[in-house]
Image (cartoon, rainbow, N blue to C red):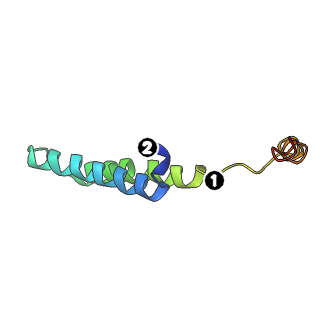
Amino acid sequence: MWKSISRTQWVCGWCAAVAVVAAASVVGGVAMTVNAAELWLVAGLAPPAVMLLVWRGAPPVTVAELLHTVNKPSKDSR
């Protein structure tokens, strides 16, 4: 189930969750100052930015893996 979710969906979900929590805090009566807005902005954008930079696709095939797949006997020869 978790493998079917893309990076973009994770980032959108994170940003939506932070926006919901920020809106709930404002509705709850917390004063939204410039410093608090900067903190919400950093908390909302820094983790997805790092995730997009760090999260790569599958690692390249190593020589050992390549040789193992080439030397594997075929099932048709049995």
Task: Residue 1: give x, y in percent of width and height.
Answer: 43, 43
Residue projecting furthest to the front: 78
Q: Does residue 19 appear to the left or right of 70 in the view shown?
A: left
Q: Amino acid at mark 2?
A: Met
Q: Amino acid at mark 1?
A: Gly
Q: Quadrant of the C terminus?
A: top right
Task: Residue 40: give x, y in percent of width and height.
Answer: 31, 50
Residue pictured at 37% horizontal, 47% vertical = 43
Residue where numbered disc 1 is placed: 57
Q: Does residue 45 appear to the left or right of 22 in the view shown?
A: right
- Residue 31 or residue 11, whichever sits in front: 11
- Residue 36 or residue 15, whichever sits in front: 15
Residue pictured at 91% horizontal, 43% vertical = 71
Mark 2 or mark 1: which comes first in sequence?
2
Circle 2 SS class: loop
Q: Does residue 3 appear to the left or right of 26 in the view shown?
A: right
Q: Which corner quadrant of the image does residue 11 belong to?
A: bottom left
Residue pictured at 87% horizontal, 41% vertical = 64
Q: CA distance from mark 2 to mark 1?
A: 17 Å
Task: Residue 67: give x, y in percent of width and height.
Answer: 90, 45
Which label is found at residue 33?
none
- Residue 42 or residue 70, whichever sits in front: 70
Residue 12 appears in the figure: yes
Task: Residue 34: give x, y in percent of width and height.
Answer: 25, 55
Which label is found at residue 1?
2
Say few, some or many: other residues with alpha carbon within 10 Å of mark 1 (under 14 / 14 to 19 / 20 or more).
few
Q: Does residue 30 appear to the left or right of 76 in the view shown?
A: left
- Residue 76 or residue 73, whichever sits in front: 76
Circle 1 SS class: loop
Q: Which corner quadrant of the image does residue 69 belong to?
A: top right
